[in-house]
Every structure is written in C-alpha cells, then in structure tokens.
Image (spheres, helix red, strand yellow):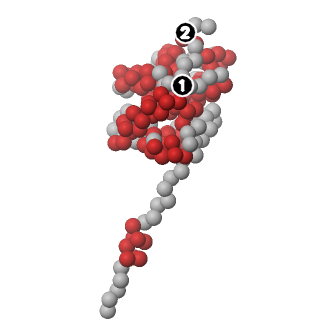
C-alpha cells in the first residue's frame, strides 16, 4: 500500500471509509463531478490529503476553488488531526478559539466551504464520542459541527451528532414578571 493510501488520523478501517465516502459525496455536489468515477473499492485507504487531491483531479473541469491556499491549510489541518485523546482535545481547544467570531472556517458569511466539509469529516469520529461536559468545553466547535451537519449532505455516511442547545427564554417573559403595577 502506498503512502498516499495509508489512512491517518483518529479514524481507521470502516470509519475512514465512511469518512471518505462522506467527503466524496459532499464535495461531488460542491465541485460538480461524478462520484462514481472514483474507485470505490479503495476509498477507505486514502488519507484526507490524497483523497482531496484525487477529487480535485476528477473535478478539474468543474468549479474553481476560491482561496486555494487557505483551503490547503485546512486540508493539512484535517489530515494531521491527531489520534491521541489529549492531542485531540488540545487541537479542538485551538479550533474552538478560532470559531469564536465566525460561523464557517472560510469566507465571511454563512455558506460552508470545501474546508468546512473536510475538517468536519476529519473531526466527526472524535467529536461524536465526546462526553456532555467535553462538548460544553468546546461550545464553538459544537455549534459549528451542528451547523455543518445540518447544511451539508454527507450521503448518510456520518451519524448526526446530538448537540444539546440551551432553551431559549424570551427576554419579554422575564421583564413582565418583574414589572409591578402601582396605581
């Protein structure tokens, strides 16, 4: 097996295959290519960097990438996501800080990018196993994960992560309880 086909990161075996199928499915829509042209029998053997490179070759005549240098930084981030729990927590802490002021990884709006799809897929396996208290520590990552999983179609390859959201209590209900009428 070549280095390009060795699976890296915290996902192995069927997990890498599901991750890669999810990436292939989501990016085929985004980059306008036929995912059936990808050799499905070996999809689980690709690391994220090699998978993305092959996808770009398939979509060569398709949609050009915006911010290719920035995308490649996030591809590297996704490819190098650690497999050891303490290192994963440290990496998530940094990402949590990065996501404090933004809804998506690239761009200035709310539309997920190719980078969001790749990083989400790389983190999914680890994040889906976080405890409730760990999820609270990484609230920005969890908000982002929830947003991406609800905006992108991963072809059913990745399980939905249940993200507990705080109950919204309108400010007006709090104010009316405190108002005392004095006639």
Which residue appears at 41% of the width and 71% of the height? 174
For disc 1, the neighbor class at 10 Å (few under 14, some 14 to 19, many from 20) is some
Relative to 31, residue 161 above or below:
below
Disc with the residue nearer the chain's start (1 vs 2)? 2
Quickly name the residue at label 2.
Answer: 3
Residue 136 position, x and y percent, is: 48, 46
Disc 1 to disc 2, C-alpha distance: 18 Å
Q: Would residue 157 be visible to someone looking at this image?
A: yes
Classify residue 14 by image quadrant: top right
Residue 68 position, x and y percent, is: 38, 22
Task: Check the picture and name the quadrant holding the C terminus.
Answer: bottom left
- Relative placement, left or right, of 4 versus 112 is right
Which residue appears at 64% of the width and 16% of the height? 42
Residue 83, numbered circle = 1
Residue 39 position, x and y percent, is: 63, 16
Name of the residue lying farthest toward the bottom = 183
Say which of 4 and 93 sits in front: 93
Relative to 77, residue 124 above or below:
below
């Amino acid at each position: 097996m070549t280095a390009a086909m060795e699976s890296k990161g915290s996902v192995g075996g069927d997990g890498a295959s599901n991750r890669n199928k999810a990436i292939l499915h989501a990016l085929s829509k985004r980059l306008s290519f036929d995912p059936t042209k990808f050799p499905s029998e070996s999809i689980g053997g690709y690391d994220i960097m090699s998978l993305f490179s092959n996808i770009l070759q398939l979509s060569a005549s398709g949609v050009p990438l915006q911010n290719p240098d920035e995308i490649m930084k996030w591809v590297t981030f996704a490819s190098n996501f650690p497999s050891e729990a303490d290192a994963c927590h440290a990496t998530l802490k940094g990402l949590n800080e990065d996501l404090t002021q933004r809804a998506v990884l690239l761009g200035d709006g709310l539309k997920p990018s190719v980078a969001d799809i790749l990083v989400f897929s790389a983190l999914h396996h680890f994040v889906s196993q976080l405890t409730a208290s760990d999820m609270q520590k990484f609230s920005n990552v969890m908000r982002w994960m929830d947003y991406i999983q609800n905006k992108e179609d991963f072809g059913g390859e990745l399980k939905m992560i249940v993200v507990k959201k705080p109950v919204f209590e309108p400010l007006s209900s709090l104010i009316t309880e405190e108002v005392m009428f004095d006639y």
